[in-house]
Every structure is written in C-alpha cells, then in structure tokens.
Amino acid sequence: MPDGTMMGPVLRVEDLTVRFVRRDTDVAAVNGVNFALNAGETLTILGESGSGKSVSLKAMMGLLPAYAKLSGKIWLNGQEMLSRSEAELARMRGGAISMIFQEPMAALDPVYTIGEQIAETIVQHEGCSRDAAWKRALDRLEQVKIPSAARRLKNFPHEMSGGMRQRAMIALALACSPSVLLADEPTTALDVTVQIQILLLLRQLQQELGMAIVFVTHDVGAAAEISDRVAVMYAGRLVETGTTREVMKHPMHPYTRGLLASTVHGGVRGHRLETIPGSPPNLACLPPGCAFAPRCRHAVEACRREEIPAVATESGAMARCLRVQALVPA
Amino acid sequence: MNAALQTDLDPRDRGGPAQPLLLVDSLRKHFPVRGGILNRQVATVQAVDDVSFSVQKGETLGIVGESGCGKSTTARLLMRLMEPDAGEVVFDGDPVGARRGIPVSEMRRQMQMVFQDSYTSLNPRMTMVESIAYAPRMHGLGRREAYDRAERLLGRVGLNPRQFARRYPHEMSGGQRQRVNIARALALEPRLVILDEAVAALDKSVEAQVLNLLEELKQSLNLTYLFISHDLNVVEYMSDRVMVMYLGRVVESGPVASIYRHPRHPYTRALFASKPTLDPDRRTTEMPLTGDPPNPINPPSGCRFRTRCAFAQPRCAEQVPMLGAPLAGDAPPSHIVACHIPEAQAPMRHTIEVGHA
C-alpha cells in the first residue's frame, strides 16, 4: 500500500521532453512538461489528438521505442526513472507504477485467463505463493465489482463484455497496489452508461488504495467527473494547470477557453458553436514562441518571438500565455 | 450547385411539405450466428427489430443509443447496403425497391451517407476531386462537369480547391477528410443525408467546426438529416426530434426539448443521467445503471430493458411494450414511449445542466 507517511509528491516530472528522431523527421512530441502529484490525487491531462498526452504517459512508464529521445527527470517515490536500466524499469512497471489503456482487448493476453494474468503479475513482483496470488486476484476482481468474481477468474478476455474487460484490466493494473496509476483514455471506447460506472469505480478505488492517478483524456466531461487538478496540453506543452474548478470555470489560456467553448453541451442549442480556427501545428516544425499563436485571436507580435514563460497565480494555477493579465480580469 | 436546389421548392418534391420524406415501417434485420462443425445456425442477433419512424422534410432526426442498439444497422438498411428481412421504406411517397416505387439506385441518388471513419471511407488511391466526382460520373455526368462540381463542393465545405483538389486522403487531417466525405455525399445533390457518427472521431474543436458546417449546408441546400450518434450533447444540439434505441428497438421518441427535459422511459433517463456533468461542483455520485447492455443475441423477452430496469414487473417479461403516449404526465402528442409501467414514466425533475462560463 502506498504510504501517506512519505513526504512530498509520489510522482514528479521535471522538464520532460520527447523527440522522435528518425532519418528524415524530427518530431517534437513533448516539449518540457512539469508537474508533481501527491498520493491520493488525480491529475487529468486534457488535450486533443497529437498534443503529446499519451506520449508523456508512455515516457513515464518507459514504454517508448528506442528511437525516442527523452530528456528531463521523472521521480517516482523519490527514485529517478529515466536513468534506470530496462531490468529495473521492468520491476517497477506493474509494481510501483502501472497503466491502463483505452483498448483492454489489446492490453490483456488473449490466451491466458484473467486470473492467471493477475496472479502471474503478483508472483512476479512479490514472489509470493501461487495460492496467495490467486487469493489476491480474487480480492481485486471483487474490488472492481465484477459480479461472481470467482467464476470470472477462469474467464478468457474474449468471454467478457467491454465494460467487464475494462474492469479486469483495472484489477490487473492494481494487482500490486501501485502508488501511481497511469490511465490512457480508459473510458473513451465505452458507452456512456458504462463510462460513468468506470469513472465512479476509479474514484472509489483511489479512496480505498490511496494511489495517485494521471488520467489522460480528450473528454472535458470525463475530466470534470474524475480530476482534482487539470493540466491542459497543446503541442507537447502544458499550457494551463489548475484545480478542476479553476480550469473549467475560469479558464485563463485562450486555448483552454476555445476548447471549452467549442465543447457541445446542453446550453448551446440554437446558437452557432464557437470554434477554434485552423488545426493544431505540425510537431515536426513547431513555430517559435507560442504554438497556439497562429490560431489565437489575442496573439500579439511578442507571442511569435520566443518561448512563453509560465505565469502562476496566487492559488498555484498556471497559464503559459503572455496576455493572461490582459485577458483575465483580476 | 443546381440552382433549383437552393430554392424552397424542390422540383423533385412529390407530396408537398406535409408528406414525410422518409417513412420506415416495421423494419427488421436478424443476423444468423453460425457455429459447430456443421456450421448450423445456432443463434440470431436481433439487430433491428420492428423499427418504425418517419422523417419530415427539412428536419433533423437524431438517433441515440449505445453500441449494439441497432442505430448503424438501421442506417445501412435504409441505404440498402444490406437487405432488410422485413419492413418497408417509403421515400417521399414512393416505396423503395417495390415494383410501383422508386428503384434503389434512384433512392441512393437522393439519399446519401457519411460514415464515422473518414479515412476508410475514401479510396486511398484517388485524389479528393476524383473521389467527389466519382459518383456523379457513374450517374452519367461528363468528366469536365463532374470535376467542376467537385471543386465547387470542396470550396463549399471550406477547403480551398487549389490547395486540396489534388491531395490524397493520407495527406489530410481527420477533420479535412470528413469535410471531403461530406462534399462527396452532397455530390449527387441528395435530399436526405444520413450522418452515422460523422463527428465521433474528431477532436472537439474540429467537431464544432464540422457541426457548424453541417448546419450551414442544411440551411442553404434545403437538406434533411438523419443524425446518428452516441453523443447525447451533440444529438441535442443538432436534432429537431430524437429517437432513442435500445437493443434493436425504439424505446422513446419525440421532440428534442420534450425528450431532454422530461425523458419518460427508464432507459432514456438512465442514459441522460450517465452523461458527465461538465461541472466539477455537481459530479455524478450514483451509478444510474449497473452492468453492460445485454448481448443482442437472444435478448430478454418482452421489454428488452427489463433486466436492468428498477421498475420491472412480471408483465414486462411477458408483453412487448408498444410505442404510445406516455402513461403518466402531460407530453406533446408526438412524444411516445414503449413502457408498461406508469410509475416508471412519471415526470421527474431532470437536472438541467448549467453551461460553464
């Protein structure tokens, strides 16, 4: 169990950058991401496709291909991750840090039963007996509220429905009580009625197990339901962070404002939708200065010149925009 | 574009504005499930079962439901991309495919479809103008005219023909490709466009752009839409009337305001209550429904929702509920529900979402 006694954040990411360098391309996928996360806290990284949110998660998990060039620091429980060997990383993955994915069918092994997969993980990481591991596997399935869990342990992934598989994958990820759970769009492929069940389940499991969650999504609704804090990502940078309430109710960065305004909700019927003109920049040739400037209504000359410093508010919220003071009434 | 299309009086209009453009009666499609060594039929997927509805001229009918509810199968049956087992489709007064009605090829000229996956619905070896001009050429338009029309349509959907006409699908973003798919659907100057999850794969900021485009095109070209989506917010935004499906059947249908403000069917209510709030101060605290939708192979008898319904009674297992006026409370006459139990339909205070600033 992750202990609340440890001082400081369980996960700290400092100036993380990821470039995919191949013979003829150089894609700057993540360009200096910073955040820290305490036990029992949920941070949502909100962004559109290609913003670098999934790549950031995979970097934390050590799952990127060899041609990805990483720099920066990732501390997990006080230990730096990026400088570790593959063998050490393998010990941490599934142990102290684990990940759930959008597609459980791709994350689970189709030729082993759910029980075997969970028990194997526990034996592998903790070296306990098979019996003890199976007992824990059963506990976990019950914890994720899979009905008749004992019978389901003997099921293969294809014998379960979509929502059930998602729960089984969560049980597998939580097998060794990780201190950090990385969730990569785990509710995107689900139906609405199942999605809310999974969000509520994650909230409850977090209270029981005390883990920190990094939840990656493009769905503003899911972010509002699950997160304590929200970080908005655009072109590989966090452009705004703050508590969920701050970001959703008083967005500062023009991109966040545009994203929220273009999200269709109950109140907009009969009005033309506000949109963000244009499309996200090509990560292989990012413009200098603010990457959002070409689409931004408020951009001035200085926005296009150099890197934009983060502006922090008193409450600890941050926006990476030169014109924050001008745009947001104090 | 055909100038006549832009006036209110479509020369192809046949029964006047009051006659529904599309009338669907008892549409049914069951898929056999084969298995065993003899490959015998072992079960049936009742994908669409006894679905009836109509679409008025110039309106947008939204169809919502979860995966497996039959909404996409319904769209494919309407386009005759698959043959229905039973049921009749009447397009502006003419039965489709019947001896006295209009042939399928003519129906497809007036009814077009846009799919979810913008990439797989375009031929990777054709440029954008070729893709758009393909159908008009197949229907007998000359090469020059077809290409001119394709370029005009590209401009119409917000893509500069000079820049995009000669591009291939892989050279464009998802939003741009979906615009091309819309242009292609419009190339035959259809009267009805079926949008099957047409914005589901797009990012939110692009989704808003495409929804605005669809709205503009609808106004200027006098189109009628059948808008299929799992996204409740988008359906509310786009539709005049909404039809809710569950496991191959229609459970509720009516004007959008009436359905969204006072949903009557217990499934519709649970569906709306499952919608994420967008307001961190008013988070969902209870699960409206537990479990997944049942398998459409051998669905529950009687009312198909009864296995997950809090109000279910013995008669729900015995009788299939018919679509009719709600048993409790006032509702506009066009608001209909398929449910036996009055208490389940009693009007309740539905939290109306407050938009964020």
Image (tube, coloured by chain):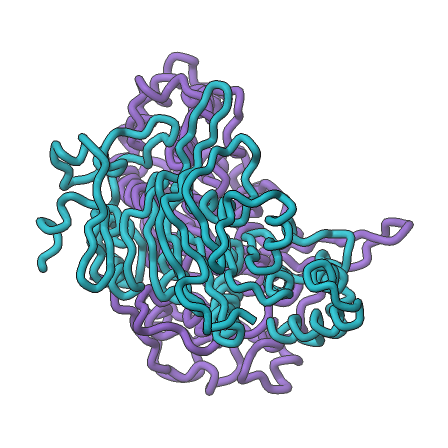
Chain colours: A cyan, B purple
Which quadrant is home to the C terminus of chain B? bottom left
Lateral position of residue A272 relative to residue A34, left or right: left
Q: Residue at x 50, y 39 (%)?
A: B117
- Closest to the observer: B116 or A150? A150
Name, please, the residue furthest toward the right.
B37
The mark total stands at 0
User: Closest to the observer: A20 or B1?
Assistant: A20
> Of residues B181 and A315, which is closer to you in this image?
A315
* x then y, percent, for residue B259: 37, 69
Could one spot residue B297 in this view of the protein?
no
Residue at the image point whose x is 20% and y is 39% from the top: A296
Quarter placement of the N terminus of chain B = top left
Q: Residue B351: which quarter of the image?
A: bottom left
Relative to A328, is A2 on the left or the right? right
Q: Position of residue A55 (x, y in %)?
A: 47, 43
For the point 32% across and 50% down, which residue is it? B17
User: At x 44% / y 82%, what residue is drawn?
Assistant: B327
Task: Tell me the quarter of the picture where residue B276 sits.
Answer: bottom left
Above or below: residue B91 compared with residue A154 = above
Residue B173: image x %, image y %? 40, 32
Residue B185, given in percent of the width and then of the height, sits at 43, 34
Query: Up-down: is A291 above or below B51?
Result: above
The answer to whether residue B83 shows anywhere in this view is: yes
